[in-house]
Image (spheres, helix red, strand yellow):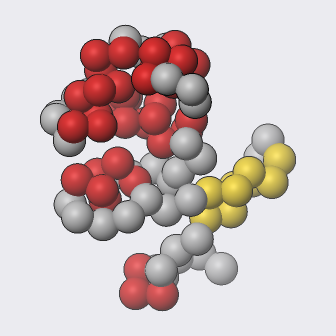
Amino acid sequence: YPSRKAAADTVGMSKDTWLKIERGETVRAGSYAKVESALHWAPGSCQDILDGGKPVPVEPLDDSHVVAVVPVEEREGVAR
């Protein structure tokens, strides 16, 4: 996105909320979900970043399937 405002407008939030997320300030879970979707990250990626980790990128296949890169140490219990 060319600017914070453009990114915020794209996901339907204020520029101030987008900035809070960039700063690591707490916002509503729905705001994190909007950012994750816009940046093509798996759900929970914003929290992962706040916890010192990295986002998990997702690659849309079609309207009903999504592929995510899941680290080996997190694969236990994942459907195959």
Of 9 and 31, which appears nearest the observer?
9
Q: Residue furthest left?
A: 25
- The residue located at (37%, 36%) in the rendering is 32
Residue 49, how many percent across, how many down?
30, 56
15 in relation to 43, above or below = above
35 in relation to 71, above or below = above
Horizontal side of 69 relative to 36 (left or right) equals right
Residue 55, how many percent across, how many down?
43, 59
Is the N terminus in the top left, top right, bottom left or bottom right quadrant?
Answer: top right
Count up the numbered dots. Answer: 0
Of 79 and 33, which appears nearest the observer?
33
- The residue located at (46%, 15%) in the rendering is 5
23 in relation to 60, above or below = above
Horizontal side of 5 relative to 21 (left or right) equals right
Residue 57, how many percent across, how many down?
56, 59
- On the image, which quarter does residue 58 sit in? bottom right
Q: Residue furthest right?
A: 62
Horizontal side of 30 relative to 66 (left or right) equals left
- The residue located at (17%, 34%) in the rendering is 26
Q: Is residue 65 visible?
A: yes
67 in relation to 26, above or below = below
Is the C terminus in the top left, top right, bottom left or bottom right quadrant?
Answer: bottom right
Q: Is residue 76 visible?
A: no
- The residue located at (46%, 49%) in the rendering is 43
Of 38 and 1, which appears nearest the observer?
1
